[in-house]
Image (tube, rainbow, N blue to C red):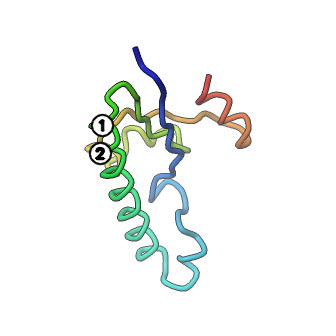
Amino acid sequence: MKKGCIAVFAKTPDLSAVKTRLAETTGQKKADEVYALCVDCLEETLGEFKALRPDWDVVWTLAEEDAPLHDFWKNRCFDKIWTGDGELGTRLHQVYS
């Protein structure tokens, strides 16, 4: 029986702007690279957590409908779902339902 779930809300480079404040000074390409490193680090940390707590699920909850099939997410661990449309509260409700 699953005890819990960690839902990580994320965006997809090329489909949405990521690290926009950083991109103002470094350019979007560098910001995308930093974002990818952040996602890599988070994925590694969550993988370690999952190894210790196999009774928990981890899910990437993605802002864009096409994101679960995007190359950025294709080979990443954990399930991927779209958050759905709407404001943040609506998307939170959809994911946690």
Callout 2 amino acid: Glu
Camera-nearest residue between 31 and 9: 9
Looking at the image, which residue is at 40% across and 28% down? 56
* Mark 1 touches mark 2? (CB < 8 Å): yes
Name the residue furthest top: 1
Residue 68's label in the rendered image is: none
Callout 1: SS: helix
Residue at position x 62%, y 22% in the image = 97
Q: Which residue is mark 2?
A: 48
Q: Position of residue 81 (x, y in %)?
A: 47, 33
**Mark 1 or 2, closer to the camera:** 1
Q: Measured along the vertical axis of the image, is residue 2 above or below residue 48?
A: above
Q: Residue at x 42, y 74 (%)?
A: 29
Q: Residue at x 60, y 75 (%)?
A: 21
Q: Residues within 10 Å of mark 1 (few under 14, many from 20)?
A: few
x then y, percent, for residue 90: 72, 34
For this view, does 46 lie left or right of residue 91?
left
Mark 1, residue position: 52
Task: Write down the quadrant of residue 89 in the picture.
Answer: top right
3D distance between C-alphas at marks 1 and 2? 7 Å
Quadrant for the N terminus in the image: top left
- Callout 2: 10 Å neighbours few (<14), some, many (20+)? few
Report helix, strand or loop for mark 2. Answer: helix
Q: Amino acid at mark 1?
A: Leu
Q: Please state the horizontal and vertical placement of residue 70, each as a whole percent of the image.
A: 37, 45
User: Quarter-wise, where is residue 79 in the image?
Assistant: top left
Where does the image place residue 12, in percent across and percent down from the top left?
46, 53
